[in-house]
Image (tube, coloured by chain):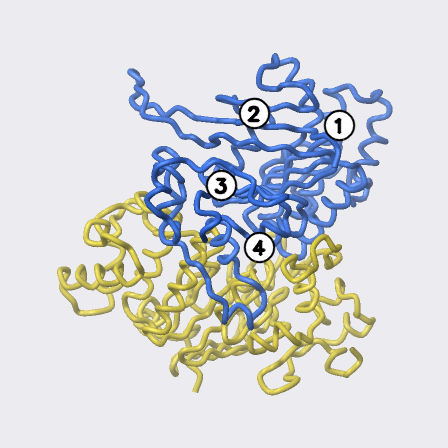
Amino acid sequence: MSAPILQLTDVKTHFPLTRGFILKRSAGTVKAVDGVSLSIARGEVLGLVGESGCGKSTLARTIMQLVPTTAGTVVLEGKNLTTGSIAEVRDVRRDMQMVFQDPYASLNPRMTVFDTLAEPLRVHEVCAAADVPARVAELMQLVGLAPRFMQKYPHEFSGGQRQRIAIARALALEPKIIIADEPVSALDVSIQAQILNLLSQLCRKMNLALIFIAHDLSVVKHISDRVAVMYLGKIVELGPALDVIDRPLHPYTRALVSAIPTPNPDTERTRQRIVLPGDPPSPINPPSGCAFHPRCPHAMEKCKIAVPPLTRADATREVACVRLGEI
Amino acid sequence: MPLLTVTDLRTSFYTRSGVYRAVDGVSFSVERGETLGIVGESGSGKSVTCYSIMGLLPVPPARIEAGSAIFDGVDLLKCTPAQSRSIRGKRVAMIFQDPMTSLNPYLRVSEQLIEPLLIHEKISKAAALKRGLEALEAVGINDASRRIHLYPHEFSGGMRQRVMIAMALITKPELLIADEPTTALDVTVQAQILELIKKMQRDLGMAVIFITHDLGVVSGLCDRVQVMYAGRIVETADTRTLFYSPLHPYTRALQRSIPALQSKGAELYTIRGLPPDVSKPLPGCAFAARCEFATARCTTTPAVLAPATPGHAHACTRVQAGEL
């Protein structure tokens, strides 16, 4: 695999909480992302999974520099975005684009498809004004939409088609990396399959790196080369998609994998499911030590004391669990 | 005799842009203690079917055009308001997708939890509260005696769904209709809620109609499944048969498009086109326009749900004719 295109080192994104209206007092911090190190290579698909509130969307926004980083560095092709000036970040941002979950909310209802797709081309002056319509038509074809729909508004399209428009918009500037935040969660199964096929085709064809955020593990396994599992702002397991999902090592990943209902009545009825007690804890006041210990079936005294670092478990996999060898 | 028999239910929505036939001639039955899954994509009419039975649709724009829903000898669609009140909420209960919006944020959990008891049973408030407390404990809420007096916003999503289930089951219904109760929840919490529904079903011996779009959820929970498309049932069978030997092209296409059943990285099967506009007449099979096996006859001849083997019925004329 080639050199990483994006490198995150110990990234932290904390949000201060305040109490009171005029006399604001600090009431703690939400550690949404708390020490994440990752790298992604050109053309690679990295799946990011976790429950709601685990910080996966905040991590995406941090990479895009849509929220300020508290600590750590985000390096895109040698350029450090966390210390760069606003102008520099803006310039780099064309190399990173985002696709959001809800294609009903992420497109401007008062802009036609043409306006939506032409806007990034104009803002970044990537082609002469006269060439814009041709480029827009090309983009629409790329995502499987007929260019004759150029003058239509988002409400005239179905959810799947809107998601295609959102993907076309992300591709307009020929980015090197796309961050897709739950791009198929709002879609029906048959439409979901279309969008997944499209995303993996585009990655192959354009050698795009893709960070694919989802909570559906079967979707993530299907599309990703590598998978990172997050729990309460930290990565607990990172490795090749098939290894992580078919042979999970961290107790949380195991529980997560076992919680997915499989469309297979025979195995579904006989298998042992690990049902985790309780809800994910609050990131305002995370448990001491390993954040997963209150729900973990294997937790011991030592789990409550120190935060386990992400350590290499085998040739390809990193896991953050102190009892790794014992369970 | 089945607990609930729905026959030729037709529900339409009258809007300015036309009449939408959301449910277009649906017939099915549910036995006592059975779990029936209704699967379909958005707009397939699975929720409207159940809302029609429960009488929860706003009239207008909705109108139940025809059909009957016989629950223990009473037609829920034509009975008197008094009859309906004695059944709905007591013997037939419903839980909804979004626990954030289906609890009243202004009322304490205790008040809304015991409301069905105060309405349906001659019971004192103190006795009702005691039953409410038991119900909360039964759905696995720790520290129930304190939590019963809290407001819904003080509960997490999974906890709210537990409260909803406790509320629906407090009158010990014979039929529970669950409309995507786990769609808004995380997988680990979804696993908890599915286990809970199974446990409560065993304890109370009730029948469950489980509406979902997730074939995975159906496979572990339901005895029988029916697949809906554009307001019609296209296939119905026991769960194993439906998963291992589906006959209707739509069911097969649906299965081939789920990543969980395909080898990793392989191109997923996609169903071309979009669901049909149900405000336009559909003389033939509703799926014909998207079906890879459709012939000219499919778009003109009505597709009728007919049994292939006992308990397994589908509505594909070509499979019925032995052509596929």
For the residue pair A310 and B97, the one nearer the viewer reads as: A310
- The residues bearing labels 1 and 4 have C-alpha atoms spaced at a distance of 38 Å
Q: Mark 1 points at which residue?
A: A173
Labels 2 and 1: the sequence-earlier one: 2
Q: Mark 2 points at which residue?
A: A66
Q: Do the residues labelled 2 and 3 touch (CB within 8 Å)?
A: no
- Looking at the picture, how far across and down is residue B240, in whole percent? 58, 76
Q: The yellow chain is which one?
A: B
- The residues bearing labels 2 and 4 have C-alpha atoms spaced at a distance of 35 Å
Q: Mark 4 lies on which chain?
A: A
Residue A115, placed above or below residue B20: above
Can residue A182 be seen at all in this image of the molecule? no
Q: Within 10 angstroms of label 3, few (less than 14), some, or many (20 or more) residues? A: many
In the rendering, which numbered label is found on residue A165? none
- Looking at the picture, how far across and down is residue A70, in whole percent? 48, 21
- The residues bearing labels 1 and 3 have C-alpha atoms spaced at a distance of 37 Å
Asked if labels 2 and 1 share a chain, the reply is yes
What residue is at 67 percent from the left and 78 percent from the top?
B304
- The residues bearing labels 3 and 4 have C-alpha atoms spaced at a distance of 15 Å
For the residue pair A191 and A286, the one nearer the viewer reads as: A286
- Element under disc 4: loop
Q: Which of marks 1 and 4 is in front?
A: 4
Residue B108, placed above or below residue A126: below
Q: Name the residue under label 3.
A: A320
- B275 lies left or right of A10: right
Q: At label 4, which amino acid type do we have?
A: Arg
Chain A drawn colour? blue
Q: At label 3, which amino acid type do we have?
A: Ala
